[in-house]
Image: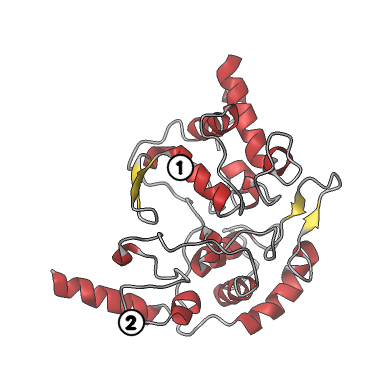
Amino acid sequence: MPDERTIPTGKEGEAIRYGRELLVHTAQYFGPRGSIAQISNGMNCQNCHLEAGGKLFGNNYASFIATYPKMGNRSGKLERPDDRIVQCFERSLAGHAPDTTSREVQAMLAYMKWLARDVKRGQKLYGTACGKLPFLDHAADPVKGLAIYTSKCQSCHGKDGEGVLAADKLSYTFPPLWGRHSYNDGAGMYRIGNLAAFAKNNMPLGASYKSPQLTDEEAWNVAAFINSQPRPHRDQHADWPDLKLKPIDAPFGPYADKFSETQHKYGPFGPIKDAQKLLSSKKV
């Protein structure tokens, strides 16, 4: 995370600071009672991109700008950075697309560009995304995950995953993990591998990749429990037009292999990965 004292003065600096503010307090501007538009579920971008996208293994933005434009495997189209912001609004914020020409989206991009100002295209950075956990040799267990959730997550996120509203009632102090105000089933966090790694490296409150509070198995199981709960649905029939590029933990079919939807959602993932490798070796 660059030192905020390096943010330039003038209009450029104003845009960067405004972009950070929008990412930290998204709901105040775009939530159900947003001051600019009412197009999201009340969560903030920072709920998934921790510390305004600056935390290692907290879905940080450091390499974001440098990877675009790129072909999006999920969309099957060449994407720009603002396309990805739209996807987050439609999936993680379970809402509607913002105007990508607006001052607000341009400010978000200005902040992300400042955050990644020294990153070159193709450069490999440590701590991007959420990290990856080793596969279990069995399916993740939502029932065991409930016990983990009750003991280590419920105090912040609520018995029914409803989160805790802030005093102003505009956003969440702790975000909902399921239900109608949480991310929908088209979001990246609905892939169990992403959520498990995020939980391991960041949760409960105070945990980090250096000081985790969950074992790998606990992280897989609590992710399985959370993602077994009801949430908004998104039509995904056009996602992943090339099935060979579909992630191993994509929770909805069709797939390029013969494994069940349940196994793609909860595992075990090792046999699926082995089958993919075998198929690739036969094509060489």
Q: Quadrant of residue 218?
A: bottom right
User: Foreground: 188 or 115?
Assistant: 188
Q: Is residue 9 visible?
A: no
Q: Amino acid at mark 1?
A: Asp
In the image, taking residue 238 as reference, residue 226 lies left or right, namely: right
The residue sitting at 64% across, 83% down in the picture is 144
Q: In the rendering, at what x and y percent does residue 261 appear?
A: 45, 78
Q: In the rendering, at what x and y percent does residue 114 appear?
A: 51, 30
Q: Secondary structure at mark 1?
A: helix
The residue sitting at 63% across, 73% down in the picture is 222
Residue placed furthest toward the right: 167
Task: Tell which circle, 1 or 2, labels the residue nearer the N-terminal end.
Answer: 1
Q: Is residue 38 above or below residue 190?
A: above
Number of disc labels: 2
Q: Amino acid at mark 2?
A: Lys
Q: Which mark is residue 232?
A: none
Q: Which mark is residue 83?
A: 1
Between the C-alphas of marks 1 and 2, the distance is: 32 Å
User: Foreground: 261 or 67?
Assistant: 261
Q: In the rendering, at what x and y percent does residue 99 appear?
A: 55, 35
Q: In the rendering, at what x and y percent does residue 142 appear?
A: 61, 80
Query: Which quadrant would the N terminus be assigned to in this image?
Result: top right
Q: Is residue 200 above or below residue 49?
A: below
Q: Is residue 193 visible?
A: yes
Q: Residues within 10 Å of mark 2 (few under 14, many from 20)?
A: few
Instruction: From the image, tell me which residue sits under label 2.
Output: 258
User: Foreground: 18 or 221?
Assistant: 18
In the image, taking residue 234 as reference, residue 225 lies left or right, namely: right
Q: Secondary structure at mark 2?
A: loop
Q: Residues within 10 Å of mark 1 (few under 14, many from 20)?
A: some
Q: Quadrant of residue 164?
A: bottom right
